[in-house]
Image: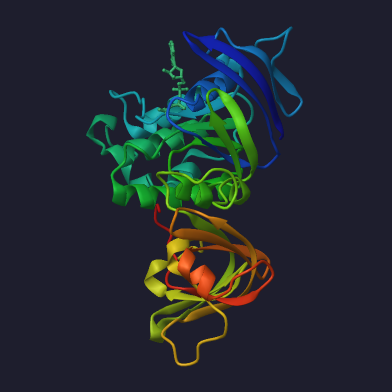
Amino acid sequence: MKIDFDIQLQKGSFQLEAKGSIPSGSVTALIGPSGSGKSTLLRCLAGLEPGAKGQITIGEEPWLSSETELPTHLRRIGYVFQHAALFEHLSVSQNLQYARKRAQGEAQHSLPEIAAAIQITPLLERQVDTLSGGERQRVAIARAIASNPKLMLLDEPLSAVDENSRYQLSLELERLFQQFQIPTVFVTHNYAEAARLTNFAIRMRSGKVIASGPTAEVLDPTHGEPSATQAPFSTVDLHGRTDLAEEGLCQLESAIGQLLVPLDSIPNQLPRRIIIRSRDVGLSISKFEGSSFLNQIPAQVEEIREFSNSQALVRLGCGSGTLVALLTLRSVESLKLKDGLAVYALIKSVTLEQS
Ligand SMILES: Nc1ncnc2c1ncn2[C@@H]1O[C@H](COP(=O)(O)OP(=O)(O)OP(=O)(O)O)[C@@H](O)[C@H]1O
């Protein structure tokens, strides 16, 4: 279900002029600096900004046009905020049942199925006001799915959750996106989270969409301006695994080739993607025999871009994927790196954590 929007809204001195298109089957990251209009765009999609003009079309259905303005309760949206708004005096199960009772359309998934997917089955009889922050967010997400949404809007759902639960919850969100296949727009400040969880990204600045496309491309650190706050990294798609339990290693089949990683760094259910920080990638002109580097991946230099006055980002084509290495300018010079050169990428570690 494709989503098209072209929205104008004046809010005090802030002007939103957001135009974009989200392909069918996408989980979309909405990224951009604080105050760029991410939450405002989400509110417009939900029909919560009465001053919004322009057009929003979801599949074949116009939600906003010069003739129509579909009210929020008819838009079939599952909205999850940073701080979960739940019915405090009801149990978890009653919260889900309430959402299901008011849901439109035919239910695609049963409540026990939803509860199991987001791991709240043991919490079902608990009162909401006894739950931790991470548990509340799980319930809020389950409740949103229980309402049979055509579109999920998640406004930084993980940001109020502590670091440990955040990682765990992000793995569950990834599973949910795969299992329920509900188109989702997901606001996050965390690029690594966006890279792992989404396949499409929209970058906003000053109320406008300034870039959109597959997440790995939008977040490619060798494109656009370097981020002052987020360390550069590459996103690598995974296809399969072989556990080498005796050695405590896991062999991953990935877009850049085979990778050996510590077994305990990979969850039981294979994630779709891993993050490789650019500072964890080194380069060598020839293969190292007798080296401690387990991962030496044949690669070709595609682009060299200055990153600071002492460092450069080097984009490498490896297999069907891309890696970006962060090197000193001195190394770039001493290795005589140039576009097209064949090299080996030496990978120190891979991560699933938030950069
Ligand atoms: N009711 C309002 N009146 C005037 N300005 C508003 C109002 N609501 C929001 N704004 C302004 O609109 C701009 C966009 O806000 P919005 O919350 O959409 O940004 P954001 O990208 O989601 O930011 P953050 O990442 O900090 O959550 C901000 O400059 C904000 O101050």
Q: Is residue 65 above or below residue 91?
A: above
Q: Is residue 140 above or below residue 215?
A: above
Residue 237: % across, % down: 59, 61
Q: Quadrant of the N terminus?
A: top right
| Viewer-proximal residue among 205 and 308 | 308
Q: In the figure, is residue 216 to the left or right of 137? A: right
Quarter, ligand 1: top left
User: What residue occupies the far right of the structure in this picture?
Assistant: 60
Which colour assignment does the render follow?
Answer: rainbow
Q: In the figure, is residue 355 to the left or right of 8? A: left
| Res 143 quadrant in image | top left
Residue at 56% across, 26% down: 77
Residue 48: % across, % down: 52, 14
Residue at 49% across, 57% down: 233
| Viewer-proximal residue among 51 and 326 | 326
Residue 125: % across, % down: 31, 37
Q: In the figure, is residue 12 to the left or right of 168? A: right
| Viewer-proximal residue among 82 and 145 | 82
| Res 184 quadrant in image | top right
Residue at 69% across, 70% down: 340
